[in-house]
Amino acid sequence: MARKIRFQNRNRSLFFPTVRKRVDAYFKENNIPKHANGEMYFKTVFFVGIAIVLYALILSGQFSAWQMFVLAGLLGAFQAFIGFNVTHDAIHGAYSSNKWLNKSLGLLFNVIGGNAYVWSITHNVVHHTYTNIPHHDEDLEVAPGLVRLSPEEKLTKIMRYQHLYAFPLYGLASLSWVLRKDYLKFFKSKIGQTDNTNHPSVEYFNLFFFKAIHYVLFIVIPLVILPITWWQFVIGFLFMHLIFGMVLGLVFQLAHVVEHLSFPMPDEETYSLDDAWADHQMRTTANFARKSRLANFLCGGLNFQIEHHLFPNICHVHYFKISNIVRETALEFDLPYTENETYWSALMSHYRMLKRFGEESWIDIEKNNSKEKLAVA
């Protein structure tokens, strides 16, 4: 039976009630809705519109092979940007107060190859509740046996080199997502330690129907329309997903697997953590490039992961304004507010974490091997 971790709040922390009250006051005093505004509508039209234009240009067949290759890469990047800037908010219910509009925009996630329903379970429920808790937060299990993103991950010798191969491996993320991950997650009995057996009947249909739509749009139609060979298509298709996956991986990993964050394990007897849930989020989540206009435009608020984890129902275009409120309140309650000032510093921090976890695994294995040799001797 799946076990649920309890957040005990043994210190009786008042951080979250306080920061929530202050954030609510900000919106009320400035008469600002918490959902999408003009900026968000522009971003939606921009990213979805550019993706449609790129797709149409590719299908026009009016470009050289190298030009088509570049267009395929750009299409992969803009699919990731649609995920960051549009569907992520919609699936969280943060885009609009209108549930139908959130549901409709969330279906764009299905069109670009994911599954909004599966994502709502793995991300909205499991990841946001059990952030950075090994064996519960499956975002830490990107490639079991190859990439170690937590101290509790099983040790293998190859992980000594993960800081060298992890980044290109992230490029396979979207391809895995489109072809296998959603099916596996949907039919697993548990996601982490969360029960995953009771799906609405319509979601079985949606899973296969929208996957078929995606395959038709991105495999069948290009093969039928474009005057290219099958191997040229394969190269373009793989490059599109390589860029798509790299953009995903090199944004998502910078929020939870960087220096100064924790990977807590629950007490074995009570299956609980001492922290309050919000305090736990502050210890396991980091921001990056908070003041960068470019990062704020492209990342869809994912560079404000702290604010997003505390207030997932607030549209990301408001995160910059409320981030100072969150930061000041966290410091007031003696809680960490972890951030890397630039994207590059966050990337280097993640690189160092990969190296650290890889070196720790190698050291542990070598110690075990030495003990075994001594025992035999």
Image (cartoon, rainbow, N blue to C red):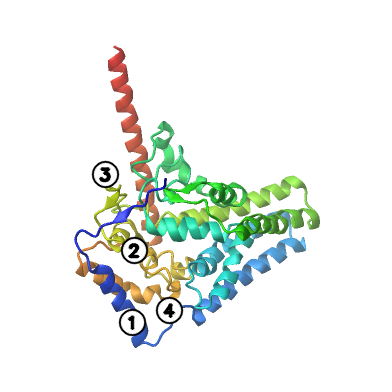
**Viewer-nearest of labels 2 and 4?**
4
Q: Which residue is mark 2?
A: 341
First in sequence: mark 4 vs mark 1: 1
User: Which residue is at a point 53% across and 78% down the rendered structure image?
Assistant: 98
Amino acid type of the residue that numbered disc 4 sits on in the rendered structure: Lys
**Viewer-nearest of labels 2 and 3?**
3
First in sequence: mark 2 vs mark 3: 3
355 or 23: nearer the eye? 23
**Viewer-nearest of labels 3 and 1?**
3
Q: Using the numbered discs, state the Cα–Cα distance from disc 3 to disc 4 in whole angstroms.
A: 41 Å
Q: Quadrant of the N terminus?
A: top left
Q: Secondary structure at mark 2?
A: loop
Number of residues whose C-alpha sits closer than 10 Å to that of mark 3, classed few (under 14), some (14–19) or many (20 or more): few
**Viewer-nearest of labels 3 and 4?**
3
Q: Which residue is mark 3?
A: 269
Q: Which residue is mark 1?
A: 26
Q: Using the numbered discs, state the Cα–Cα distance from disc 2 to disc 3 in whole angstroms.
A: 40 Å
Q: Using the numbered discs, state the Cα–Cα distance from disc 4 to disc 1 in whole angstroms.
A: 10 Å
Q: Secondary structure at mark 4?
A: loop
Amino acid type of the residue that numbered disc 3 sits on in the rendered structure: Glu
Q: Using the numbered discs, state the Cα–Cα distance from disc 2 to disc 4 in whole angstroms.
A: 26 Å
82 displayed left or right of 352:
right
User: Which residue is at a point 77% across and 53% down the rendered structure image?
Assistant: 223
Please determine whether, in this image, residue 320 is positioned above or below residue 141. Answer: below
Q: Which residue is mark 4?
A: 34
First in sequence: mark 2 vs mark 4: 4
Give residue 366's quadrant in the image.
Answer: top left
Number of residues whose C-alpha sits closer than 10 Å to that of mark 4, classed few (under 14), some (14–19) or many (20 or more): some
Q: Are marks 2 and 3 in contact (CB under 8 Å)?
A: no
